[in-house]
Image (cartoon, rainbow, N blue to C red):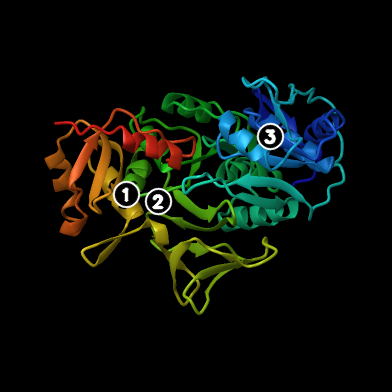
Amino acid sequence: MASHSATPFALHNGQVVSRGNLWSDVLALAAQLPDRPYLFNLCENRYLFCICLLAAAARGQICLLPPAGQMAVILEILRDYPGAYIAREHAPQQTGLDWFKVAAPNSECTATPPHFDWRRTAVIAFTSGSTGKPKPCPHSLDTFKTSAEMAVSSLELAEQQLLMLSTTPPQHMYGLETSVFWPLFSHLVLHDGRPFFAEDIRQTIKTGPWPTVLASTPTHLRSLIKAAPQWDNLAGIISATDTLSEKLASEMAAILGQSPREIYGSTETLSFASRETLRENLWRPYSGCRLTQDKKGQTCLESAHLLETVLLQDSVQIQGDGRFTVLGRDQDMVKIGGKRASLTELNRRLRDIAGVEDGFCFIQENGRLAAVVISQITKQAIKLGLQPYLDEVFLPRKIHFVTEIPRNQTGKLAKSELEKLLAGLDERN
C-alpha cells in the first residue's frame, strides 16, 4: 500500500484527495456510524463507498453488498441479517428501513490509518442471482489486499500512477476489486464517478489529471467503439464479467488505441487470472494462484489470498504450465443430438454478427435452441452469420426480436428478469 500521506489516492468531485485525507475522512465517518453489526453499503459515489467500507471495518461492522439495488433484493437479504441499516447518500424510497446518510466529507485534514482486524470478515458480497437466490460470499480485508497486490503486479500496474475509471458499480465484485481495492493497495488513483454514455466516458478520460485505465464490460465496451474515434489519455482497458471476443478486441484496439486485457474470477474467488485477448487464448493465473483438478475432474483454486481451496463452477482445461482454458459452466453446456456446446460461446458468436447490437441464446421447453436479439437485420442474415462457426444442430430455430434486453449494471441477465422476458416474447414476422 502506498503509505505516504501526500500520495494521491482519489479524484473526488474533481479534486485530488491524498491518502492522509482518506484516512481522516474514514476516521470521521467511523465515529458517526450507528452501532450495528451490518450495513448495506449502497453509496453511489465510489469515494464515499470506499470511506464507508473502511469506516465500517474500523468499527468492526460488515458491509453487505447486494447484487442489485432493488429493494426487494435488499429485503430478501435483510431477513438473514436483522438490524442491518442502509448507508448511502440519499434516503431509500422504501420507508421503514434504517438509513444513515453518508455526506460529502471535509477531505482537508490528514490522519494515519486506523487499526483494522485484517483477518476478520469485512465484506459479504452476494452472487448476482443469475442462477437463482443470491449466495453470500464473505471476505476479509487481508483477502482483498493480497488479491489486489497479485492482480496489479501481474498486470504490471503496481508502480504506475494512473487513474482507475470503472463503469461497474462498487457493489459488484469486479467493480469493488478494480476501482476500490486496486487503488488502495497500489499507486493507482480511484476515480469517484461512473460515467455511462460513451461520450461522457471519453471526456472523463480526456480531461483526467493522469492517463486512465478503463475497467468495463464487453457489453459496455461494444458501445464505445461507435463513439468518436479520438480517445486521448487512455492508458489501458480491463474487461470482465463475460468473454471478450477477438473481433470486438480487435475493433477496440483499432479505435480506442489500446489492446484490452481480460481478468477472470468470481464473487467467491475474486479475480485470479488474466490474458491479453489479442495475443493469447489461454488464461494465465496470477503469481501465487494455482489450479488443480480432483479425481472427479472438478477444478479447484489454491491461492495465497484464500483461506481454503475453492471449487470453481466452471469447467476448465489446465495446461502443463498452469495456464488454462475455460470450457464453460456445467449448467451452461447445451446438449442437442448427442453434441455439446457452451451457451457462452453461442452468445459470443451471435453478438459478433455485424448488425446485431445485443443478443443471447436459450433452450426452449421442447429442447430446441432459440435466440433473442436487438437487431435490424433479418433472421436469415443472422443464421447465415452463425453458420460458419456452429454445427447445424446449434443454429437457433426461432429468433425473437426485441427493443431492449434487461441487463444489469455488469452486463448480466438476472434470472428473474430473464424469465419475465422469455415469458412475454413475441416472434417478429
Q: Is residue 277 left or right of residue 12?
A: left
Residue in view at x 64 percent, y 32 percent: 46
Using the image, determine if residue 42 lies above or below residue 291.
above
Q: Earlier in the sequence, mark 3 or mark 2?
A: 3
Task: Determine contact: label 1, label 2, CB under 8 Å.
Answer: yes
Q: Earlier in the sequence, mark 3 or mark 1?
A: 3
Q: List the residue tagged with mark 3.
A: 41
Which of the two marks, 3 or 2, is nearer to us in this view?
A: 3
Q: Residues within 10 Å of mark 2 (few under 14, many from 20)?
A: some
> Residue type at mark 3?
Asn
Secondary structure beneath dot 1 equals helix
Residue 63 spot, x, y in % from top left: 71, 40
Query: Foreground residue, 345 or 207?
Result: 345
Residue 90 spot, x, y in % from top left: 67, 20
> Residue type at mark 1?
Arg
Q: List the residue tagged with mark 2.
A: 243
Residue in view at x 61 percent, y 37 percent: 76
Secondary structure beneath dot 3 equals strand
Q: Residues within 10 Å of mark 1 (few under 14, many from 20)?
A: many
Residue 179 spot, x, y in % from top left: 61, 40
